[in-house]
């Protein structure tokens, strides 16, 4: 059975300013979110219990944007001190065990600040800015408020509560959109039309990212 679907496309930009949550397991009692506090260069990124303001938006220290250049930027950094913002970064040359920290975003995108969301919901790094390396984000102590994050070479292919991530709609869709040939769901911004490997259904799934 073959079907043809007609779409009405509308170009819209990223809408940065939301939470980046780790996958919540069935036994977990809290949702944990990426946190940058204080908003200064060199601050280790941590996981804390997800929190919102009275208007329903993310608290400032959990308000990140997944930008079109594949950087992950803290959107509430003081622009008078950090005019290019603060971005998630491990080492200038990435290696397993390095801690993730807030660092000055490059005026030109720094390859060590590019993170690609892959099919296993990992954030993967790059050594050259064009191909993925074998390193991904890892929560040191899962389900623990205040846990730091580091890079690991043991990137899994299954969903876990220490390497698998869920980017909320208002955090943005990274590089996904018309230029990448992906159909982004603007009601669930950050999710794209995705072909299910089972071959049975298509669904909205967090947009996979390519470095080029």
Image (cartoon, rainbow, N blue to C red):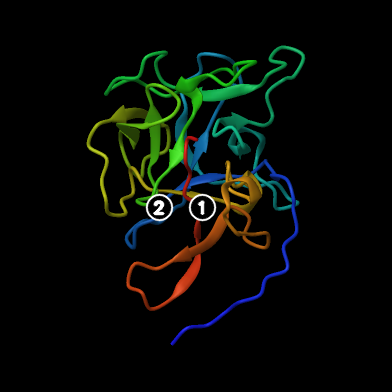
Residue 51: x and y, percent? 59, 46
Residue 192: x and y, percent? 55, 59
Q: Give the labeled residue for mark 2.
A: 23
- Give the spatial CA distance, label 1 vs label 2: 16 Å
Q: Quadrant of the N terminus?
A: bottom left
Q: Is residue 29 above or below residue 180?
A: below
How many numbered marks does the figure carry?
A: 2
Residue drawn at 48 percent across, 21 percent down: 111
Residue 128: x and y, percent? 40, 21
* Quadrant position of residue 150: top left
Q: Answer few, some or many: residues within 10 Å of disc 2's Cα (few below 14, many 20 plus, some between 14 and 19).
A: many
Residue drawn at 50 percent across, 35 percent down: 212
Q: Residue furthest bottom?
A: 1
Q: Answer few, some or many: residues within 10 Å of disc 1's Cα (few below 14, many 20 plus, some between 14 and 19).
A: many
Indicate which disc, 1 or 2, sits on the residue closer to the N terminus.
2
Residue 113: x and y, percent? 50, 24
Q: Give the labeled residue for mark 1.
A: 207
The label nearer to you, 1 versus 2, is 1
Q: Residue furthest left?
A: 154
In the rendered structure, the answer to whether residue 201 lies left or right of residue 180 reads left
Kind of element beneath mark 1: loop
The mark found on residue 2 in the picture is: none
Residue drawn at 47 percent across, 49 percent down: 208
Q: Is residue 170 above or below residue 212?
A: below
Residue nearest the observer in this picture, 160 or 147: 160
Residue nearest the observer in this picture, 5 or 47: 5
Kind of element beneath mark 2: loop
Residue drawn at 69 percent across, 29 percent down: 76
* Quadrant position of residue 82: top right
């Amino acid at each position: 059975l073959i079907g043809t679907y007609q779409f009405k496309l509308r170009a819209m930009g990223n809408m940065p300013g939301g939470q980046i949550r780790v996958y919540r397991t069935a036994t977990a009692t809290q949702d944990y979110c990426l946190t940058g506090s204080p908003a200064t260069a060199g601050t280790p990124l941590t996981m804390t219990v997800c929190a919102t303001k009275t208007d329903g938006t993310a608290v400032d220290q959990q308000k990140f944007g997944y930008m079109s250049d594949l950087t992950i930027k803290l959107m509430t950094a003081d622009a008078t001190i950090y005019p290019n913002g603060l971005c998630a970064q491990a080492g200038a040359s990435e290696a397993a065990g390095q801690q993730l920290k807030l660092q000055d975003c490059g005026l030109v995108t720094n390859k060590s600040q590019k993170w690609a969301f892959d099919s296993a919901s990992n954030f993967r790094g790059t050594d050259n800015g064009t191909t993925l390396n074998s390193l991904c984000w890892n929560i040191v102590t899962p389900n623990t408020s205040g846990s730091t994050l580091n890079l690991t070479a043991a990137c899994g292919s299954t969903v876990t509560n220490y390497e698998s991530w869920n980017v909320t709609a208002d955090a943005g869709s990274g590089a996904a959109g018309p230029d990448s040939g992906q159909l982004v769901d603007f009601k669930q911004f950050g999710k794209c039309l995705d072909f299910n490997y089972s071959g049975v259904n298509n669904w909205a799934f967090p947009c996979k990212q390519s470095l080029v």
